[in-house]
Amino acid sequence: MESHLSRKLLGPLGAAGWLTSLRRQEKLHLLLVAALGTLVFNAALVSSAWAGAPPIDRKVYFGDTHAHSAYSSDAFGFGNRLPPDTAYRLARGDKVKHVGNYSVQLKSPLDFFMLTDHAEMIGIAQIASDPSTILYQTSLGEDLRDPDQKAGGARFLNALQTAAGSGVAPDGYSNESTRTIWQALVELAELYNDPGHFTTFAAFEWSSMPNGENLHRNVIFRDAQKVPDLPFSAMDSTKPEDLWTYLEKQRARGNDNLAIPHNGNMSNGRMFQPVDSWGAPISAEYAMRRMENEPLFEMMQLKGTSETMPSFAPEDEFADFELLPFSLYTWQRVEQQKTSYVREAYKSGLRFQETIGANPFKFGLEGGGDDHGSTHTWEEFNYHGGHAVLDSTPKDRMTGTIPLEGAAKNLNARMSAGGITGVWADGNNREAIFAAMRRKETFASSGVKIAPRFFAGWDFPPDLTAQTNWVRKAYATGVPMGGDLEPQSAQQAASTSPSFAVSALRDPNSAPLQRIQIIKGWTKNGEMMEKVYDVACSDGAKVDPNTHRCPANGAEVNLKTCAISSDKGSAALAATWKDPDFDPSLPAFYYVRVLENPVCRWSTRDAIALGVPPPDVVAPVIQERVWTSPIWYTPSREKLGGRKLVRQ
């Protein structure tokens, strides 16, 4: 049965009528998109199979796991008045109307999508805009009716931030309000789900921010027909452990789900701290619960990357990428903590594995948008802002900021174009994509459709990636991204080093590839260490065996036109690499980072359009990239000195 609100959202046709209409309009569109995808990614769709399982063609699919509509109160405060279906239509490739009153469309549509509106007071702005409600008569309603949309929206946002911090919703908003809005949004996810072409999930964002420190998680349900009546909000609890209890109860009822934390860079060290929410040291039970409920982490989105900082990784010359070291609460620059960042968490997790027998930070990687304007144009050359009317024009993107008291200036220019997620899945449907997320066969992208492969094994031949059906062989004798490389057998020589097979195909709508890197972290005697190895170079160049770096390939960017070098870089890179510093007694992780040649940052393109210099608060060019989920190596119990070990 359709709800009254869903009819209001979807128009006079209602869900059933609109779905029929949509099918007629989209039939040819979907056929064209499918055909284009086959042409573009044909080289990437290699055959593969799990060892002991029937042969399966595992293919790459791209999606956005983090997006907001006007039913997120902050998005409404930013001036978003678009219906929530706008985000779905844009993601699948439709041309839609931007809040800036112009049309936008993705050059390369997505394969899957989820709308993750904030659970906290979801839809309160719509209720406060309805003259028949109590909220309409309050100061919140008055703020939303202010002819000066930016000023009224700023007051509205500040009032809601205060309410959320107190844990008490304004009079006139109740659980019944939440239930009505949530059920309508779940119906919308069902409406747009088109297995084989465009997959959608029911989802929401839990927006905990104790003491202004970001602990946000996006919650995703595998089956939209089994979702609970109410989402879990930070007004129910600000503790991740309580969110896990909510998720565990749902799974016990057959409703599989997972949560994805994001923006560790804005957590002031709380995202990967060594204690639980009550200040007690992390236990093995905590570690197991965290990884069961949160198998992935969002590496990049509009509000920056959370990989590492140059000060934490001084030997990583590519660490300074789309950083936003600000507080999400005050929007002022804050001193960064190591426990806010992914690479440090991975290293810390290895130490926990040694001391408590379990790793609380054994998560895979993915990327998201966090767009609040319902129009996440994540392509760098196609970016039109992420905060509705606040950055809907080039001028606002160059000079504007977040409308909260005390916010730093020029924040809009510091925003990235956002990220997307890649998965290697058995098909484009909920079951297959969710399964890929569960097993962490995923990668994060800064907004490009590079297709990376990553495997580890003990007996890969040196020319594996040059062989026919090499991916099938890698699955049969090794493990893919997100997996665990088991220790060597007793029969294998102690000096044997694991082999890693890597490859990447460029995004045809972006720059050629420059290099593939493997980033390793390990612990020894309690000390945490890391090293970056280039393993494949563009243009036929070789890695220097002493520095482990590729030579510069000479790729350039014309800052007046954004033209890039047409004769530099590679369409595909691949290598089989052995770790020259491997010690079988030491736990380690390895993940792949693939870099493109430089391109103009979106802010430089806007500056050219305005005839002004690029903003000096960000770099004029960037190197787009992808990061794979790691592969972990854990020594046998004997090599760990007999310490207790929990296999995750």
Image: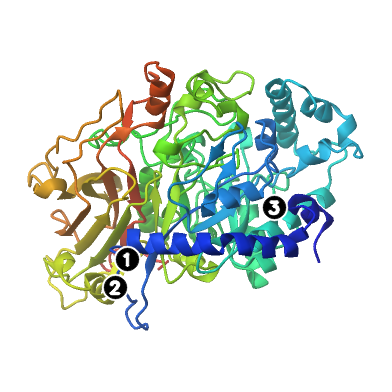
Left or right of residue 490: residue 600: right
Give neighbour class at mark 3: few <14, some 14-19, many 20+ (Cα, 10 Å).
many
Which amino acid lies under the numbered mark 2 shown in the image of this protein?
A: Tyr
Residue 197 horizontal/vertical position (percent): 51, 65
Which residue is labeled 1 in the image? Answer: 480
Which residue is labeled 2 in the image? Answer: 475
Q: Nearer the viewer, residue 428 or 203?
A: 428
Quadrant location of the C terminus? bottom left
Question: Measuring 59% from the left and 29% from the top, which residue is drawn there?
Answer: 329
Which amino acid lies under the numbered mark 1 shown in the image of this protein?
A: Pro
> Can you name the residue that lies furthest to the top here?
612
Check disc 1 and report its element: helix, strand or loop. Answer: strand
Which amino acid lies under the numbered mark 3 shown in the image of this protein?
A: Phe
Relative height, residue 607 to residue 68 (above, below): above
In three-dimensional space, the C-alpha distance between marks 1 and 2, rounded to whole angstroms, equals 7 Å
In three-dimensional space, the C-alpha distance between marks 2 and 3, rounded to whole angstroms, equals 38 Å
Which residue is labeled 3 in the image? Answer: 232
Q: Are marks 1 and 2 in contact (CB under 8 Å)?
A: yes
